Amino acid sequence: LARQKSVDKIEPVGDFFLHRWFDKVQNMGAADSWAQIGIVCFILFIGCLILFFFSKWIHLKKIGFYLGLVFLVLVIFANIFAGNQKDELINRKSAIVFAPTVTVKSSPDASGTDLFILHEGTKVSIKSKLGDWNEIEMEDGNVGWMPSKDMEII
């Protein structure tokens, strides 16, 4: 709905399919949920290690070893997902242009080369910050610098 009211019509660049899958799985739970899953899988991993080291039967040793590997991989992925979710909550990287028109520059300086013009309501991603300037990236992949005062972080 907001994109329809924006003057700038920007076509997003498609993501690599593995990146989309990774994001979909990651967004299935919140950071706390992934942390809890990681803790449970770690406890199960420790149980599998105990089974592997202290079992007398080779069949149970194999089960403990292979299940332990599975739980270790799940612990690693759950922690990666939890960390990414936490990072998204703390470091907000999206912003909306609030100035009627903004000229995006090639460098963080008013004397930089003009790259393109953005209008009010356009969503951008913040890549970095230098003083009162933010390096932004558009959904179509265009990159440039604009003043911090002309945008609001969402």
Image: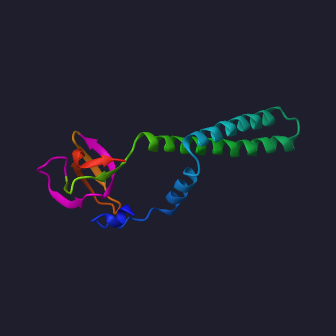
Image point (60%, 43%), residue name: 78
Towards the viewer: 60 or 135 = 135
Q: Quadrant of the N terminus?
A: bottom left
Q: Position of residue 101 (x, y in %)?
A: 19, 58
Q: Quadrant of residue 4?
A: bottom left
- Residue 17 vertical placement versus 68 (above, below): below
Image point (88%, 35%), residue name: 56
Instruction: Tell me how many marks there are.
Output: 0
Q: Is residue 92 magenta?
A: no
- Residue 20 vertical placement versus 145 (above, below): below
Q: Quadrant of residue 47?
A: top right
Image point (45%, 62%), residue name: 15
Towards the viewer: 96 or 126 = 96
Q: Position of residue 22 (x, y in %)?
A: 54, 54
Left or right: 3, with 17 as reference point:
left
What's the coloring here? rainbow
Q: What is the residue that sits farthest to the left in this orientation? A: 111
Q: Position of residue 100 (x, y in %)?
A: 21, 57
- Residue 117 vertical placement versus 89 (above, below): below
Q: Is residue 116 magenta?
A: yes
Q: What is the residue that sits farthest to the right in this orientation? A: 57
Q: Which residues are magenta?
A: 107-130
Towards the viewer: 69 or 3 = 3
Towards the viewer: 22 or 46 = 22
Q: Position of residue 3 (x, y in %)?
A: 36, 63
